[in-house]
Image: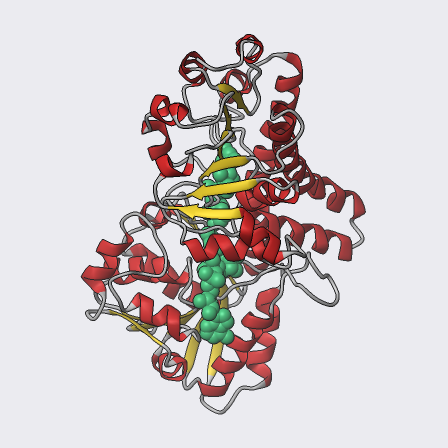
Amino acid sequence: RMVIKNVCCIGAGYVGGPTCSVIAWKCPDIRVHVVDKSEVRIKQWNSDKLPIYEPGLDEVVKECRGRNLFFSNDIDEAVREADLIFISVNTPSKTYGIGKGRAADLKHIELCARKIAEVAEGHKIVVEKSTVPVRAAESISHILSANTKPGVSYQVLSNPEFLAEGTAIENLVNPDRVLIGGEESAEGEVAVGELTWIYHHWVPQHKIITLSTWSSELSKLASNAFLAQRVSSINAISALCEATGADVSQVAYAVGKDSRIGSKFLQASVGFGGSCFQKDLLNLVYIAECLNLHEVAMYWQQVTDMNEYQRTRFAKRIIGCLFNTVTDKTLAVFGFAFKKNTGDTRESPAIFVCSHLLEEGARLNIYDPKVEKQQIESDLTSARVTSEPERIENLIHIYTDPYQAVTDAHAIVILTEWDEFKTYDYKKMLSVMKKPAFLFDGRKILDHESLINLGFHTETIGKRFTRNTLLRSSGGDL
Ligand code: NAD
Ligand code: UDX
């Protein structure tokens, strides 16, 4: 058995960066080299302001960087020196050609495999960390073996990542499980043993699951599909609650108390976002379709259709409550990230809800504690959501102070569940807003009764407030 001294990770993103920082932190005997083709990203990893915000990440990087954790653009050198190489590059949905909008785009993965084949010397364990369609490891193996040189050999493993953004360090330090999929051969078992050895530095044996490469790849897609399905299930119930007078929080609590169902991931919301759920679901749908499993494809397709319905439903409800027009009205938007404790906006429901409101001519004053101004502007003016970027630019204003964002606004719209939103002085906010003042809580985080008492017309997901009607007829101006 070889002793792993050098680990390399290709891709310094949300997964590669935190994962390898934790490996370096927990394994002082291993030298970890994280590489990326982006010079900007690497510069940021080597600076005081890291390219991603994750609670606890700064401390880990500060302790390890320059000791046994290195960030650089020198991909060739890192690959050559490494005993084990993680591939953590992005695998977005394809934006072109066959499977457009659904199939995973594996071009970055393939480039990594070719790069490894080009520069590797000796024996290398290549670990697929990115989320990929079933049998992607086979393609990597194929490229590697077709380009092999004398004295060079490979083993390819699947080791999907389950971290959630905003809690990445916590999830990496204390994972529910670690999956290691390998080839069912003596060499495969040795390679699985090497990677297991790395995790053993901090993860107990009973949490490390060894399985076949394909099961490992599919388990990742299946896990995300199940999680997304729970959110869509409770969101579907939330629509029923709004129509019937039931309260989705009470229903979720009651349902979640069944130990077979469990209470997690039953928080009704304006919809799920993030870089993974949508793309992994669509990938699963596409795989099922390609295998002629039409019913399976349709089943999982519904999970993303329900998400789309939820976002649109919320935007329409805002417009409906604002007397059926938001044209030239100012709406203060609190939160743009796809969830709290991250600056990531990929597939954020905020993009879709904001776009819908902008389409109707609303002016949006947007505030998010972590998302950069430029990011919000580029998300809302991208070709994907609008054909009129100049018009949209004039309608959005990004604020760094929530109290300024609400001045003269007709409504507050909450789209991310940041804790700080719970601590604001809403009485003060109400006093500078247009009346009747509306508040739409797309994340169910505020105390709605007290907002109604203050004089806000309040709406939230999965619940109707009958007292609002009285306020509206009295002008809501308390
Ligand atoms: P990301 O876009 O943040 O990072 C990917 C990085 O890879 C980028 O910095 C890019 O420049 C780099 N890259 C791409 N091609 C390269 C190449 N040929 N050579 C060198 N560098 C290259 O993506 P991410 O969010 O870290 O996701 C990576 C993978 O992990 C995806 O497959 C994703 O599905 C999966 N995943 C993501 C999460 C998450 O929470 N973001 C969680 C679990 C799994
Ligand atoms: C997800 C998976 O949880 C993680 O295991 C995988 O590795 C990557 O994809 P992430 O997208 O970072 O992680 O965040 P997650 O906490 O799963 O939330 C996804 C979206 O669902 C967010 O927009 C969140 O706000 C929403 N959500 C989650 C709900 O609306 N309700 C819930 O009950 C839970």
* Residue 295 x, y percent position in the rendering: 78, 43
Depicted 207 relative to depicted 145: above or below: above
Q: Position of residue 465 (x, y in %)?
A: 55, 13
| Residue ID at (53%, 26%) | 261
Of 119 and 89, which appears nearest the observer? 89
| Residue 260 shows in the view | yes
User: Which quadrant would residue 17 be assigned to in this image?
Assistant: bottom left
The quarter in which the N terminus is drawn is bottom left
Q: Establish if 67 lies above or below 431.
A: below
Apparent side of residue 168 relative to residue 249 in the rendered image (left or right):
left
Q: Position of residue 466 (x, y in %)?
A: 57, 9
Quarter holding the C terminus is top left
Q: Is residue 347 left or right of residue 31?
A: right
Q: How many marks?
A: 0
Question: Residue 50's x, y, as percent?
Answer: 31, 61
Q: Residue at x 71, y 43 (%)?
A: 301
The reply to whether residue 210 is in sight is no
Q: In the displayed structure, would residue 146 be above or below residue 388? A: below
